[in-house]
Image (tube, helix red, strand yellow):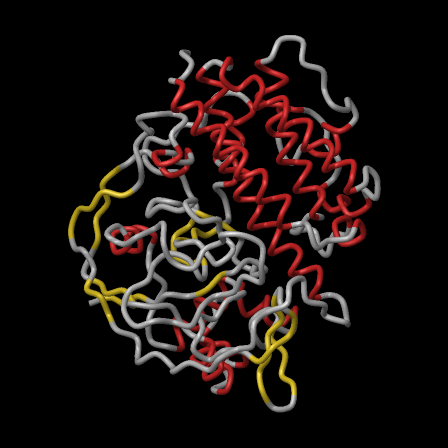
């Protein structure tokens, strides 16, 4: 495969350097202990994220495409491989928090070595390898969001509830008006993406699970012009939303009862008011801001209580296609990210990932890529639900209308929220 043009390679080098620098900035406030601890099986220590994203570039680019390349440490692939069966045995995911060594300082030196080597050889790499560098940049952006949400979950377990970054004083804002309804597209619509025209272009990049582009049938429906707010969710709680089984799917109700769920994750009632824990510590909830850290089970129950439903991913994509995916409230740098207060009118990107009612399954004609990178998305298309739109912790320029995120229905440590839909 041919090597891309000099301008394309230069743009790729700039993107690689920018992505790698942001990861370093996000962990700057952390101690070695902060970066080593794992708060639950679904989360990973910060330094594991830093090392794993470096392992990706070292394994799939430097090792496989640079003659004579010597691994930084031959023992580390076992530690920092995530789920690639083709790459052999690996350290068990629930045990990542036991890796007190290598230290955070050693991991940062590893990252620096990978950065220097990759940038030095980038222009000479074949096109196939440069495409993998582009994939690695998008992969690391996904881990930047996980890095923030995993740190948030970790700090929330500390009785001191420390703030990672200080936050500005909150200024009360007006509550948005009632949810408005946008009449959805009807009939055959096209969703998904075709293969990019340039394999190393950041603007045309798509993950394999976003294609192939295909037609699907939409029946008459409407979709909400904004997401559900904290204030609206507090009304659901006050009306016995978590105590009324008729709102819940059977699995969801079993999850509520087994885990004592009574509010979104990080909510706590103190002095008669609802508070939330964030990267800036514990504060009162903002009633006008989008509710976040709710599971698919909670989202579905709220929709039932509200006399609505969750949108399908096709309905969501058709509605969002004409809106700006590069703007919105998305991650630009280190700081206490959180959803902004809901604004009037449609806003489909940033703030919170929006649960859909669609199972995460392959599109018609989907084929898994050959080799280890074929394990990136396809093998997870079972038992999970699709989320759309991105969040306040998603790096800017990472999103597009066709982007498919996916989590299991009980998971809620990500910035996940709710947009309603209804049949017409």
Q: Residue at x 54, y 81 (%)?
A: 243
In terms of depth relative to the viewer, which is nearer, 106 or 276? 106
State the image coordinates of residue 222 (x, y, percent, origin top left).
Answer: 23, 65
Does the image show residue 250? no
State the image coordinates of residue 18 (x, y, percent, origin top left).
Answer: 52, 38
In terms of depth relative to the viewer, which is nearer, 251 or 223? 223
Q: Quadrant of the C terminus?
A: bottom left
Work out which residue is located at the far left of the displayed protein and give it: 187
State the image coordinates of residue 35 (x, y, percent, origin top left).
Answer: 74, 50
249 horizontally vs 46: left or right: left
310 horizontally vs 213: left or right: right
On screen, residue 172 above or below 218: below
Q: Residue at x 61, y 44 (%)?
A: 23
State the image coordinates of residue 399 (x, y, percent, origin top left).
Answer: 40, 46
Does the image show residue 160? yes
Instruction: Place residue 269 in its image quadrant.
Output: bottom right
Work out which residue is located at the far top of the displayed protein and give it: 67
Query: Across the whole image, how many numbered discs are drawn on residues?
Result: 0
In terms of depth relative to the viewer, which is nearer, 394 or 372? 394
Q: Residue at x 64, y 60 (%)?
A: 152
315 horizontally vs 77: left or right: left
On screen, residue 213 above or below 67: below
Q: Quadrant of the N terminus?
A: top left
In terms of depth relative to the viewer, which is nearer, 171 or 229? 171
18 horizontally vs 114: left or right: left
On screen, residue 348 above or below 94: below
């Amino acid at each position: 495969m041919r090597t891309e043009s000099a301008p394309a390679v230069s743009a790729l080098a700039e993107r690689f350097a920018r992505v790698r620098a942001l990861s370093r900035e996000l962990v700057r406030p952390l101690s070695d202990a902060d970066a080593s601890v794992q708060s639950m099986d679904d989360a990973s220590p910060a330094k594991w994220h830093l090392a794993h994203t470096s392992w990706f570039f070292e394994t799939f680019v430097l090792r496989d495409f640079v003659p004579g390349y010597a691994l930084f440490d031959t023992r580390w692939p076992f530690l920092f491989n995530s789920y690639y069966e083709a790459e052999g045995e690996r350290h068990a995911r629930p045990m990542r928090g036991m890796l007190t060594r290598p230290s955070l300082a050693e991991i940062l030196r590893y990252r620096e070595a990978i950065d220097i080597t990759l940038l030095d050889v980038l222009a000479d790499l074949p096109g196939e390898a440069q495409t993998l560098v582009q994939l690695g940049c998008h992969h690391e952006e996904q881990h930047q969001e996980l890095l923030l949400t995993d740190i948030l979950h970790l700090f929330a377990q500390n009785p001191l509830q420390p703030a990672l970054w200080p936050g500005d004083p909150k200024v009360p804002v007006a509550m948005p008006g009632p949810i408005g309804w946008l009449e959805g597209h009807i009939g055959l619509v096209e969703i998904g993406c075709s293969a990019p025209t340039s394999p190393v272009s950041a603007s045309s990049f798509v993950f394999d699970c976003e294609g192939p582009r295909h037609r699907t049938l939409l029946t008459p429906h409407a979709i909400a012009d904004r997401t559900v707010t904290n204030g609206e969710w507090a009304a659901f709680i006050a009306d016995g939303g978590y105590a009324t089984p008729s709102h819940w799917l059977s699995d969801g109700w079993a999850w509520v009862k087994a885990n004592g769920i009574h509010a979104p994750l990080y909510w706590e009632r103190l002095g008669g008011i609802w508070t939330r824990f964030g990267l800036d510590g514990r504060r009162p909830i903002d009633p006008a801001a989008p509710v976040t850290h709710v599971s698919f089970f909670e989202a579905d129950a709220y929709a039932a209580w509200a006399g609505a439903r969750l949108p399908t991913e096709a309905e969501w994509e058709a509605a969002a296609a004409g809106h700006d995916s590069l703007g919105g409230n998305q991650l630009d740098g280190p700081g206490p990210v959180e959803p902004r207060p809901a604004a009037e009118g449609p806003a489909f990107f940033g703030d919170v990932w929006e649960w859909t009612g669609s199972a995460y399954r392959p599109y018609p004609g989907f084929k898994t890529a050959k080799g280890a990178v074929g394990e990136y998305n396809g093998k997870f298309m079972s038992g999970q639900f699709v989320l759309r739109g991105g969040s306040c912790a998603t790096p800017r320029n990472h999103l597009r209308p066709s982007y498919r995120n996916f989590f299991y229905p009980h998971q809620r440590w990500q910035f996940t929220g709710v947009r309603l839909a209804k049949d017409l």
